[in-house]
Amino acid sequence: MTVPPSIIAPSILAADFARLADEVRAVEDAADWLHVDVMDNHFVPNLTIGLPVVQSLRAVTRLPFDVHLMITDPRRWAPGYADAGAYNVTFHAEACDDPVALAKDLRSAGARAGLAIDRDTPIEPYLDLLPSFDTLLIMTIKAGFGGQRFLPQLLDKVRAARRHVDSGHLELRIEVDGGIAADTIEQAAAAGADAFVAGTAVYGADDPAEAVRRLRGLAERANAGA
Ligand code: DX5
Ligand code: ZN
């Protein structure tokens, strides 16, 4: 199996929102994608940022945006993020009754399409939909808040997805989100993840760029041993 280079996606949820442009630039040369958590206080209890912030940030960085929509009614809102220049737009399986149709809309709007699976959602019903998607985001916490403890039992879903992706020769990133840090990223990589979201582990560090590089080194090492 040829393993593509790991993607490290710092989550600005853990950044200082009063200095967002500076916080984004701090990881610009180290990160692959910038993970943007959009929460609507309905799909999850938390409320974060929306389209105007994404539009403004688009002008201050070259980093591709990995938008993670934790919102109800993604069919109404998701294409707007593609129009705003997001590289990848991920919506939750639990919030959408026709994920394949929305994936098509996102791709026609020029973005990649991502499907997210929350903590309590089994992966099996969604495996056959994966050819319509570019990324599969498997939560390793319950979606809604940063800084939670990584749940290793959720890596069973990553293993199942990896088997499915490899046996079907699918072109799909398997992304993990929640509690990814120096002490958890290797197990996630060994389970088959190849894209890693990290909020607290990056923006809680004294040197966010160095934290990104360290995470990448650990992920690559675990992959090489796989
Ligand atoms: C939570 C978000 C995550 C969050 C991860 O629902 O989807 O992207 O920022 O934060 P950490 O890395 O601190 O667990
Ligand atoms: Zn996220």
Image (cartoon, rainbow, N blue to C red):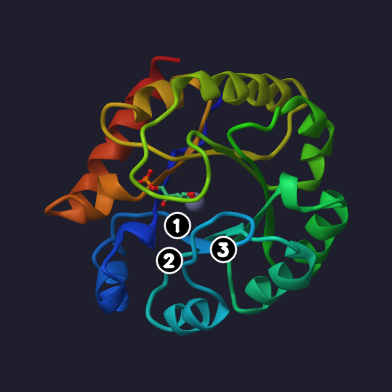
Residue drawn 76% across the image and 63% down it: 73
Q: Would you place residue 216 above or below residue 112 in this image?
A: above
- Are the residues tagged 1 and 2 within 8 Å (C-beta)? yes
* Residue 6 rendering spot, x and y as whole percentages: 44, 39
Q: Residues within 10 Å of mark 2 (few under 14, many from 20)?
A: many
* Residue 166 rendering spot, x and y as whole percentages: 68, 23
Image quarter hosting the N terminus: top right
Tag count: 3
Residue drawn 49% across the image and 66% down it: 47
Ligand 1 within 8 angstroms of badge 2 C-beta = no
Q: Nearer the viewer, mark 3 or mark 1?
A: 3
162 on left or right of 180: right
Ligand 2 within 8 angstroms of badge 1 C-beta = no
4 on left or right of 132: left
61 or 124: which is nearer to us? 124
The amino acid marked with disc number 2 is Leu
**Gap in angstroms between the C-alphas marked 1 and 2:** 6 Å
Q: Would you place residue 46 above or below residue 51 in this image?
A: above
Of label 1 and label 2, which has the lower sequence position? 1
- Which residue position holds label 1? 33
